[in-house]
Amino acid sequence: MVKPIVIAEGTPEERWREWPEPARWPELPLTDAGTPLIVAPHPDDEILGVAGLMATLGRAELVAVTDGEASHPGSTVHSQTDLARIRRAETDEALRRLGLGDDTVIHRPGQPDGKIDEEPLVELLTGLLSPGRWCLATWREDGHPDHEAVGRAAARACAATGAVLLEYPIWTWHWSTPGDTRVPWDRAWRVPLGQNARKAKRAAIEAFPSQIAPLGPAPADAAILPAHVLARFDRPYEVVFRPAVDGGPAAVRNKTDGPAQVRNGTAR
């Protein structure tokens, strides 16, 4: 089943806030977080998904898989080369606003936006991970092909190294609904955010004007993340999915009967 990502539609944040189930999810203990490896398909995915966690910890290592150059494929304002440069700079500023200093390591393999090659990504992640290290990546069934490719690559790298896989949803909040059986809510963990972490996350999101505001008046330059989308990432908590524990902390959930990937160029 295809999960269409249409910017003008989606589940309103009010419905998610009315859902009582998240209050019952266990709180993710951070004692073993160390310096987590955060894997982002596009610049800003890591901020939307786990910026509060990064701000709370005050440390992270980032793999920015693509430069997000295809976010506005028909832009009348910026070329893809321009967008890649802009979005790299936005990432740097966002991390600064989270309180992560200039010594934060960022790996930029420069994979093509919309055409992520999993094999070299698995190799890169395997070289960066170790037993017990946290690896946070987009959920393997999030609904965007790049997000799902990153999730699969991270799952494979964690299985090979004994690292701990934590998957964060992004577009899931858009296409799914509370209680949606396609989503593994039984594996959901909450990351509560204090006031300072929430403030830092808001500031980090605002570091991406190329995504949250129009580039110009043409429809092709419209904001990718309008207000109704951003509302889903201003909660007092973040959510990650932990794999089933059978086989140890690095065990992964291999699901073959899930919905098909979305290949919709409007979403990132």
Image (cartoon, grey):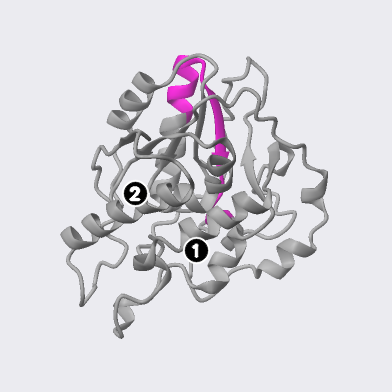
**Quarter where residue 63 is shown:** top left
User: 186 above or below 75?
Assistant: above
Coordinates of residue 3 in the picture (x, y in percent)? 52, 59
196 lies left or right of 19 = left
Q: Is residue 171 magenta?
A: yes
Q: Amino acid at mark 1?
A: Pro
Q: Looking at the rendered structure, which numbered label has been put on residue 214?
A: none
Q: Residue under circle 1?
A: 4
- Residue at far bottom of view: 217
Mark 2 neighbour density, 10 Å: few (under 14) some (14–19) many (20 or more): some
Magenta segment range?
155-172
Q: Earlier in the sequence, mark 1 or mark 2?
A: 1
Q: Which residue is mark 2?
A: 92
Q: Can you see residue 259? A: no
The CA span between labels 1 and 2 is: 31 Å
Q: Is residue 258 one of those drawn in magenta?
A: no
Can see residue 184?
Answer: yes
Q: Secondary structure at mark 2?
A: helix
* SS for dot 1: loop
Question: Would you identify the image quadrant in which residue 57 lies?
Answer: top right
